[in-house]
Amino acid sequence: SQLVTSYTTDEAGNFILDTLGERVVTSYQAFTNRDFDSQHNITNQMVLTYTEPGGLLLDVQEIRSIGFHSSGVAKKQIIATFADEAKQELLDVKIIENAKITSNGNVEESTVTRYGGMAPGVDTTGEITESDLEDAIDQQLIKTDQFDLRGNALHQTIERSYWESGAFVFGEAQDITNDPYSFHDRTDKSVIMNYADALMTDLVDKQEIFYELYDEYGNAVDQKIDTYVEDDTTGLLV
């Protein structure tokens, strides 16, 4: 097993300290790596995430990775997330399928399908397959065509669908452009174009999101959102 403690630094690269002068922990994770393939890639893993050593358990993830690109990125993953260490309270299960992976590990196209349940009796320490998953919820098709040097998405589109009557039904599409990221992997601004059709011809609105302050965990605690819609007469965004 592995134990990983994460800390956050300020804009100057210095550790953030508490009132006692101790480094502020942003997360503490315990990894149990059960199985590997012949190339030493982890295929069966459990991750417990806490607020800090001895702190509150945030979630437990059982991760199964199937097939690996030469960059080391898994071509397919099944990730079951639980709220408790006994793994009795399932939050959701995701299947992540990475269709286009570059030589440096950037994923240009991926499909994320989310489920609400698993079949009774599944051994969560062993094999988990698609046939074990129940109650489909939604699906996202994510296409990214611009990355920064650290692999952050500068431009991507997302097509969202929801499950209804035995099939996925289109819900919305987005075109997202992010300003350059800081060394904390945080952007100051995102522009989101929301569309009512998959071809992105029927614009619903445009959102400009300004992230003015983040906390030590990377959450945006102060942001401004400007929303624009097309004028019925001129077709201009107002």
Image (spheres, rainbow, N blue to C red):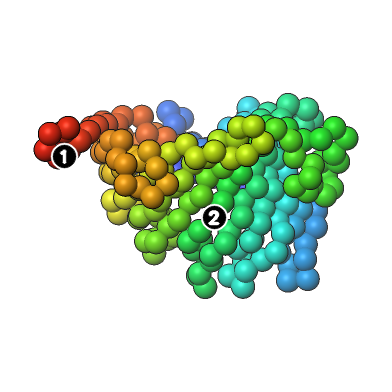
Q: 37 or 232: nearer the eye?
A: 232
Work out which residue is located at the far left of the displayed protein and give it.
234
Residue, disc 1: 235
| Residue 196: x %, y % from top left | 38, 38
**In this picture, residue 139 sits left or right of residue 205:** right
Residue at 73% across / 51% down in the picture? 64
The secondary structure type at the circle numbered 1 is: loop
Sequence order check: which comes first, mark 2 or mark 1? 2
Instruction: Kindly report the distance in space between the C-alpha atoms of the residues bearing marks 2 and 1.
Output: 33 Å
Q: Taking the image as drawn, is residue 1 in sight?
A: no
The spot of residue 214 in percent (x, y) is 36, 36
Instruction: Answer left or right for 59 relative to 212.
Output: right
- Name the image quarter holding residue 133: top right
> Which residue lies most toward the right here?
121
Neighbour tally class for label 1: few under 14, some 14-19, many 20 plus, Cα within 10 Å: few
Q: Which residue is drawn at the image coordinates 56% and 51% (left, top)?
A: 111
Q: Are marks 2 and 1 in contact (CB under 8 Å)?
A: no
Q: Residue 110: which disc?
A: 2
